[in-house]
Image (cartoon, helix red, strand yellow):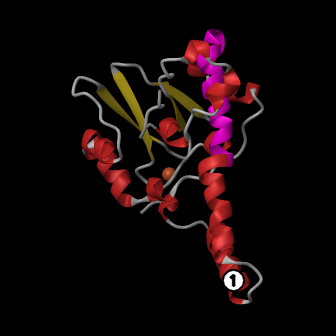
Amino acid sequence: MTDEDRPAPPVIRAEAIEALLTEKGLVDAATIDAVIEAYERDIGPMNGAAVVAKAWKDPDYKRRLLDDGTAAIAELGFGGPQGEHIVVVENVPTRHNVVVCTLCSCYPWPVLGLPPAWYKDPAYRSRVVKEPRKLLAEMGLDLAPEVEIRVWDSSAEVRYLVLPEPPADVDARSQSELVQRVTRDAMIGVARIDG
Ligand code: FE
């Protein structure tokens, strides 16, 4: 068992505070869940979406991003805890990247916000390594047999962000339109961009 497997004391404290506030009727558990979900699905991943859309439109930026993810992400003003060393991996037609933390739930907070519950699930963490193609298909992402799948195991030292393949109409769309198309799941590598 490593230190990372144990819940950090702040997590326990936060859960205790939430339980107390809920019990005293000061907050509503559903409201807290809604806030967390917004950070998981909408607010958090918007930073990553801005990075991805810029990389799709600006080849020089994309080069810098793949060369030194942390520095290129910092150009857009994003960085900080859980994002001190971010490596960006690019999806291409012949190679698909997907991210996991097999030990716990390491995740690039500055670009993706909070990890979704399934990312922390032991089933995802083991199966994406053992049978990635089958698991991704179950999650709705069918990859042709000839597409190579690379699984990146995050750690306390290195966090990964997937640069998804752009949609077919990338050239006709503005960067701000493209930002709206980028999803959290595509940046983890369990989905592709629609269109
Ligand atoms: Fe971890």
Quadrant of the image for the N terminus?
A: bottom left
Can you give x and y, in whole percent of width and height, for residue 44 in the image?
66, 46
Question: Viewer-proximal residue, 30 or 62?
Answer: 30
Residue 180 falls in which quadrant of the image?
top right
- The residue beneath circle 1 is 22
Query: From the viewer's perspective, is residue 187 above or below residue 139?
Result: above
Q: Is residue 185 visible?
A: yes
Answer whether residue 57 is magenta in the image.
Answer: yes
The stretch of residues the image draws in magenta is 43-62
| Mark 1 Cα-neighbour bin, 10 Å: few <14, some 14–19, many ≥20 | some
What residue do we see at 40% from left, 50% from top? 102
Can you give x and y, in whole percent of width and height, for residue 167 in the image?
50, 22
State whether the magenta stretch is mostly helix, strand or loop. helix
Judge from the rendering whether residue 118 lies leftward or rightward of residue 88; answer left or right: left
Judge from the rendering whether residue 75 lies leftward or rightward of residue 194; answer left or right: right
Query: From the viewer's perspective, is residue 108 above or below residue 40?
Result: above
Question: Viewer-proximal residue, 121 or 153?
Answer: 121
Q: State the residue lying farthest toward the bottom.
A: 24
What residue do we see at 64% from left, 30% from top? 179
What residue do we see at 59% from left, 50% from top? 41
Query: From the viewer's perspective, is residue 107 above or below residue 10?
Result: above
Can you give x and y, in whole percent of width and height, for residue 35 in the image?
68, 62
What residue do we see at 35% from left, 43% from top? 140
Answer whether residue 188 is magenta in the image.
Answer: no
Question: Viewer-proximal residue, 10 or 113?
Answer: 113
